[in-house]
Image: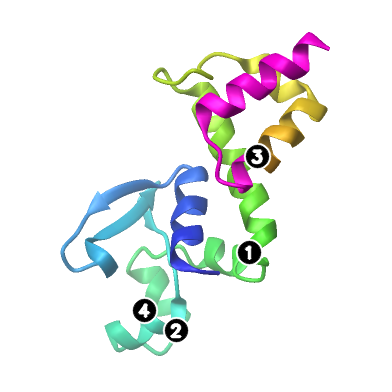
Amino acid sequence: MDYQKSVDLAIGLGFEEVCDEKAYKGKCYIRDGLIWIHDIEALKTRLSIEKNEDLKHLNYNTGSYYYYVGYRNGEVDRESALELIKATIHSDNSVLSGRFSLLKNKEVLDGMISLFCEGYREKVLSDYADQMLKK
């Protein structure tokens, strides 16, 4: 999975971006005290670590890494898109804020996910949902 897709997935799963000059590209992603891993082999090399267990002791989230590493980019995109859409609906500063009924409408939600994967964001997703709900 490429770096940006990994970042999008981490954020979609609730990891928060934290500035860290020692981290890759100056940022790391943390949730519940655990650090998201983008590339476990590169991380182990950088830290001069051989065992995954040693990463766990440093609070790296090896479980999530191995759960998602096998996904193809398209699958991660859809899963990440769903999580990001959910987060947007639950947020306070989006045109989708509070529109919880969208999460229960499979047809509309699937369309929103597809649009998100194509690069469209909140305003277009909101307009799409509005048009679909008028049918």
Q: Position of residue 104 (x, y in %)?
A: 75, 22
Q: Nearer the viewer, mark 1 or mark 3?
A: 3
Q: Position of residue 75 (x, y in %)?
A: 69, 58
Quarter assignment of residue 40: bottom left
Q: Is residue 41 left or right of residue 129?
A: left
Q: Nearer the viewer, mark 2 or mark 1?
A: 1
Q: Residue furthest top?
A: 134
- Label 1: few (<14), some (14–19) or many (≥20) C-alpha neighbours in 10 Å: some
Q: Which mark is residue 43?
A: 4
Who comes first in sequence, dot 1 or dot 3? 1
Give the residue at mark 2.
41
What's drawn in magenta, residue-wise? 115-135
Q: Position of residue 57 (x, y in %)?
A: 36, 70
Give the residue at mark 1.
73
Quarter assignment of residue 71: bottom right
Residues 12 and 53: in front is: 12
Check the image and report above or below for 82 versus 25. Answer: above
